[in-house]
Image (tube, rainbow, N blue to C red):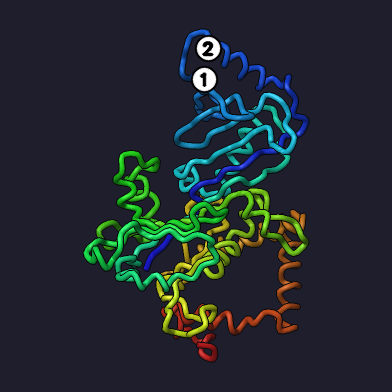
Amino acid sequence: MKAICNIDTLEAGIEIGGWHIGHAFVLELEDMKKKLEEHDLLFMPIKLNGIMFNLQNHGIKGYPYVLVNEECFNLYVAKKPMNGHCPIRVSLRSRFLWEHGYWKAWDIVKETVKYLGLKYEGSKLSRVDLACHIQGMDLTTIFNTTQDFNKIRTRAKQRCRPAYDFECYPHVEMTSIVVGSGDNIMLRIYDKEKEMQDKRAVVKEEFFKKVIWPKAGIKTGEGHIYNIEFQMRREAFKTFHFINGQELSSAENLFFCINDLWAYLTNEWFSLVNPRSDSNRTRQAMLPDWDYVSKQKFDLEENGFTELQRMYHKGVRQDIALRGVAAYATSFAVLCENNDFTEVMKDIYSRLDYLIDQGAYNWNKKIREKLNRLHSIKDIPCFEGLA
């Protein structure tokens, strides 16, 4: 099986320091809006931070200025301060997120805010879609009768099933499923290639075929390519907290804990299980295909393209592993508010050494787990006693 993960949709409010109705950018937008009305135009182009937007002749509730870019992101700008609402909202496009990676994409948004002469002070998540494109899983095999829906274990309040009955229509192919419709968390599993063939699809087919999927070795014509996508809205984020009690509310916080969030969604909130493995639903074993999905990792590097399970490929390269170490080390540095490389690495060593010494982290066990996945290095002499 092969897979690749990324954030597919990101919508958030942006907190601006010193926001006021007379800001130069707001006045410029107001002047452009008047010209749109005078000349009865649908939109007017405006270039911000090297990105071309179209200012629409209409707004939405609370945000009279709507700037659209079909390839990057949309900006929704308020005219005056609003209690409980951010003065700017942003909606990042799927292609933009996949092309740059979520870290870099968000940095471009912040750079655009700075370009406008505004002070970025944080963000408030509104919606996030976490997506995993996977090849090698087949819904038709997993759900070949109506009774197979007892393979679903979920905390969702609502479960949507296909409109047809397998017993009445046994030859209808199972290609999609939706769980949690109307909830603050919703799961969609569907055939990505079939979706891209729809002319209404926003993300073009060739972009994934030629740019994204090859990064994970996914090839069209070698089996179904499904998108496993969890959609989360603001109310869902309020239920997650860090150890210090802080809510998972900002884009930056999301990026730091995205793998923990994916683990929760694919283990506790929803999973596909073997109903015959145990009479107790909570102890039923995951189906191998879903176990593979639950173990996928989002890449925390700020270099785009979130390649999954990089460490577990037989052809693993030291440079890739090193970049992974660097990515986590920089995240640790930010959390510790320390920019000194030597001090940060010494701190990491000291803390890990303490955890291993106290038995809180089993180094040898983790090495064995990696060895079981990296069959090609099992014969390395220094690991003989662990394999």
The residue at 54%/78% (across/down) is 282
Q: Taking 40 as reference, is 347 left or right? A: right
What label sits on residue 57 in the rendered view? 1
Which amino acid type corresponds to the residue marked 2 in the rendered image? Answer: Glu
Q: Which residue is mark 2?
A: 37
Q: Mark 2 and mark 1 in contact (Cβ < 8 Å)?
A: yes
The residue at 56%/60% (across/down) is 323
- Residue 169: x and y in percent read 24, 63
- Quarter of the rendering containing residue 261: bottom right
Which amino acid type corresponds to the residue marked 1 in the rendered image? Answer: Asn
- Residue 74: x and y in percent read 53, 34
Single out the residue that lies furthest toward the bottom.
Answer: 385
The residue at 41%/76% (across/down) is 288
| Quadrant position of the N terminus in the picture | bottom left
What label sits on residue 148 in the rendered view? none
Q: Taking 190 as reference, is 184 left or right? A: right
> Would you place residue 125 above or below residue 346 in this image?
above
> Is the residue marked by circle 2 packed among few (<14), some (14-19), or many (20+) residues within 10 Å?
few
Disc 1 from disc 2: Cα separation: 7 Å
